[in-house]
Image (cartoon, grey):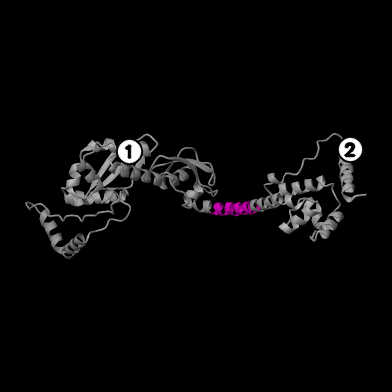
Amino acid sequence: MDVAEVTRLWHAAYQGSVGGRASGRARRPEPRPDRVNDIADLCAALEELRQANGAPSFRMMERRARNAGKDLSRSTAFRISRGTAPASTDGLEAFLVACQVPPRDRAVWFDAWLRAQRQTVRGRQDGDGREDLKLVEAVVADTSRGQVSHEAAVRMLRKAGFDAMERYRRFDAPWTVECLQCAATFRIRLSDVVLARTTCPDCPKLTEHVREAWAELLTNPSGLLSRQVVRALRAVTVLPARLKRDHLDVPVFVADRTTLRILQSNAWHAALEDVLRRHIRRPFYLDVLLVHDYDTLPAPRNGQRHRRLAKAAGLVDGPLELTPRSQEQEHANSDAGNEAASRREAATAPGSARAAATTPSSWKPTSNSGA
């Protein structure tokens, strides 16, 4: 008889015997390698493939693989059918040859084997990562059990610039928080906060949107701004914006008195708010803060305080730099330290004149608003 006909009859006889022994049980499902996610799924699918091929003996599978030039021992075929995944793609291909899978249908089985191996590696890495997180939590824990309490977790969260929107559950559990800077809501893990691996995704976007809106404002899209105001707007520098809850603060650095005098009127704020609402898709109340040159302040002491507060509030991207003229003035003030001290002592004496004060040095960040 023809070999193919013998094989067909063998399969039919086997399926009939399995159906008779099953005594009404559900028919064995066809193997689905596209649904394989892990090693257990892969081994189950390979066993289903062997059963669908007529459940050949392991000796027959060894002979089929050898005839095709593949290496598959009886013991290896037995272990694969009992739940041990093939150690390599060569072993998987030998098993597929033994189950008479044509070459065009083997690619989907190779993909399934790769997915199962990746899942195994990922699970091993997750296990190692959990052990590392336990050690980190034990270091920052404030309880005798080596765990972080809710109060300590909230303090860590606030220090990182976030506010909790729900109760703390676990060190590596997702936690709904709100950014204190821009009021964006998202989910993070306290472990990522402790390891400094998380930032607000919306804060950089806010500054980018404000600068895009400012660039559009300079084109005067509404036509309501005068040429004088547009020139003044081009001469200033937009500092990083802040959105706290529903209040949007846009600090603007003004370097000279003329520009400051022009922009002190809030007539141009409506045009700025109009373009901002096209770029920022959330309700807000606009507040424009004019940060002007510290040399223009009326009192030197107030200028020094203004400078310290602006630097601490993060109104500039980089450190405040002194101009060359200001550096010379700083050196002159340093050389005349004793003389200044004597003057301060004289100023505090009864009936003496008011104390002399030096003018604080000016600073000018790099402009991002054009010439």
- What residue did someone put label 1 on? 275
Residue 130 covered by magenta stretch: yes
Q: Residue at x 78, y 47 (%)?
A: 49
| Residue positioned most to the left | 351
Q: Residue at x 87, y 42 (%)?
A: 12
Q: Nearer the viewer, residue 177 or 21?
A: 21
Q: Nearer the viewer, residue 247 or 332?
A: 247
In which quadrant of the rendered view does residue 135 lie? bottom right
- Judging from the image, what secondary structure is the residue with disc 1 in? helix
- What residue did someone put label 2 on? 20
The x, y position of residue 25, in whole percent, is 83, 35
Q: Residue at x 34, y 45 (%)?
A: 211
- Judging from the image, what secondary structure is the residue with disc 2 in? helix
Q: Is residue 80 visible?
A: yes
| Relative to 286, 1 lies left or right | right
The x, y position of residue 225, in whole percent, is 23, 38
Residue density around tag 2, few if under 14, some if 14–19, many if 20 or more, within 10 Å: few
Residue density around tag 1, few if under 14, some if 14–19, many if 20 or more, within 10 Å: many
| Relative to 170, 240 lies left or right | left
Q: Is residue 247 visible?
A: no
**Given the image, on which type of amino acid does mark 2 rest?**
Gly
| Residue positioned most to the front | 2
Earlier along the polypeptide chain: callout 1 or callout 2?
2
**Given the image, on which type of amino acid does mark 1 rest?**
Val
Range drawn in magenta: 120-135
Main secondary structure found in the magenta portion? helix
The residues bearing labels 1 and 2 have C-alpha atoms spaced at a distance of 77 Å
The x, y position of residue 308, in whole percent, is 26, 51
